[in-house]
Image (tube, rainbow, N blue to C red):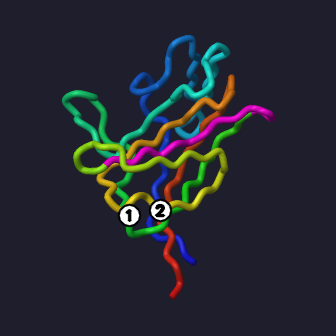
Amino acid sequence: MKIGEHWRIYWDEYASDTYLYGSEVNFLARDDVRFKNLLMPPGTVIKQWYSKTNFQKQKIEPALPMIDGEATYRLVVSMDVPEYEECMVRLVFYDKYENHAGTLTTKEKVTEFRCPFKTYSYRMQLINGGVNTLNFHWVEIQEIIKDE
């Protein structure tokens, strides 16, 4: 098994698609964003990234690579979360009509996955699983090439 193409995703936009109500967001470096919110309920989307956007409406460019249902991928998450607290990453897949096509939620640092075959676009969400503070570094999506 080898790694093919890989893409590293950072927390680049401050206000766009970030939960700001009562939040402290400090950009210490490109790969070090400190997030703190003592009152946010579990299950809340902290930050969201897109593979497809409407620039005129959202004023952001896609941050995620296009992936398809034929390949296997690995999701590698680099963030620091206090012990006994959790933060999850959710991938939400959509077909070409923007209908929900599937979901993958993980709290692991490394997860292999295949997206649904009819995936046209997807979103990646950072989900509060009972965390008050975290340091986000990056998420990497790696294409896995199986040896034949």
Of callouts 2 and 1, which one flags the residue occurring earlier in the amino acid sequence? Answer: 1
Residue 13 located left or right of residue 3: left
Q: Amino acid at mark 2?
A: Arg
The residue sitting at 38% across, 69% down in the picture is: 70
- Report x, y in % for residue 62: 33, 43
The disc placed on residue 114 is 2
The residue sitting at 52% across, 38% down in the picture is: 30
Magenta-highlighted stretch: main secondary structure? strand
Image position of 132 with respect to 86: above or below: above
Where disc 2 sits, the SS reads loop
Where disc 1 sits, the SS reads loop
Q: Which residues are magenta?
A: 82-94
Image position of 80 with respect to 68: above or below: above
Identify which residue, 40 or 47, lies in the foreground.
40
| Residues at marks 2 and 1 touching, judged by CB atoms closer than 8 Å | yes
Residue 30 located left or right of residue 101: right
Which residue position holds label 1? 69
